[in-house]
Image (cartoon, helix red, strand yellow):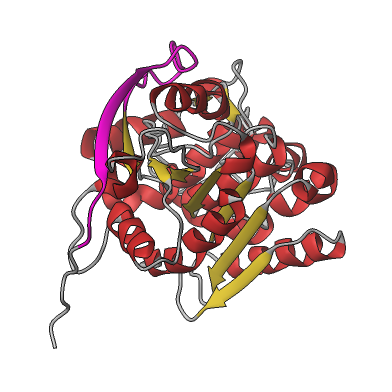
Amino acid sequence: MPIKRASWPGGRLVQLEHDSLVLAGNALGDPQRRKLPVWLPPQYDQPGQEQQRYPVLYDLAGFTGSGLGHVNWKNFGENVIERAARLIQEGKMAPMILVFPDCFTALGGNQYINSSALGDYADYLTQELVPFVDAQFRTLASRDHRGCFGHSSGGYGAMVHVMRHPETWGAAANHSGDAYFDFVYRNAWADTLNTLARHAEPQRRAGPIDIAALELGCDQGLDDGRVKRFLEAFWMSNKAKNVDTLMNVAMAASYDPDPAAPNGFRLPFNLETGELLPQRWQQWLRHDPINMVADHLDALRSLKGLYIDCGWADQYQIHFGCRILSKRLAAHGIPHVYEEFNDNHSGVDYRLDHSLPFLSQALAG
């Protein structure tokens, strides 16, 4: 039987534009003026509701994504606003305003944290977009009625934001968010190093090799030119097969920025020998959610709701990190919901049927 596309009272999608001072002059030259879709629930425009105010949820897109993509038509399914409208009509969640930030970058995205190599996207969200939206719409303008959610990098962003910015967010849903970096990222760097090696100069020739000469600077996490050439080639061709390499480069720009280094960031591995650079890797681990819990207990205890989930066959091995994260939260007595599903890292929007009602209940009171 074919899938029947549902039709719900749709609410109203408002397309705003925001000129960011925070993103002005960012190192990648990405635009500071961004479109900002905001969805108002059907009740927002109903007669007699002119004074009613609503909780707000911010949708943080995953790597290579943008909030703009989450409001587009979706084949054989619902986009985020169609799903929210249905859940509201079914009485499973209260009317809420949904905001869809555009945080895309030339490196495919960011981790919603401040980075001199990418831009200060944590400040962009908390210092600019939140007050901008609160000024434009009838929001319940307090952290107790404001939450964020996302998948993958967006789930990571939601998790990190409620720890580092509890004054802004009262609840979060983390769908398969990056965690346990030793599993998620570290093992993926071998393929990344091989891809980057194709952009090394001079090209390698058969015969004797002077490793000490070739690794000059690489033992400090510095690019010898191959990362720069890889990025230039990617931007010219935009070949999807190299997205995993782009992702690891973007993570380095997120977790270990250094304005004095080539490209504005350092790398966690020696490009020539593949050796892990402990000092550089430690910079990454500071941003790993499983290592952040103990330092942000007051923020976590202040939350009105925290939802985490993952598929137990996640191809990036994120389910292990989510389990550790839940374990450490529980060890400190942090209330949260942790669920697993029989799926992997892709096609998991159906889980919003679990998280959106959860967030609604947490933030509506």
Which residue occupies 22% across, 39% down?
237
Residue 138 figure quarter: top left
The span picked out in magenta is 8-35
Which residue occupies 28% across, 40% down?
45
Left of 202 or right of it: where is 70?
left
Left of 358 or right of it: where is 240?
left
Residue 30: where, in percent of width, then height? 36, 22
Left of 153 or right of it: where is 283?
right
Vertical comparison of 331 with 243: above or below:
below
Quarter holding the N terminus is bottom left
Which residue occupies 72% across, 65% down?
326
Left of 44 or right of it: where is 145?
right
Q: Is residue 269 visible?
A: no
Vertical comparison of 25 with 137: above or below:
above
Residue 139: where, in percent of width, then height? 47, 34
Q: Is residue 164 visible?
A: yes
* The residue positioned farthest toward the left in the image shown: 2
Residue 46: where, in percent of width, then height? 28, 43
Asked if the stretch drawn in magenta spans residue 13, the answer is yes
Residue 350: where, in percent of width, then height? 39, 69
Front position in the image: 237 or 270: 237
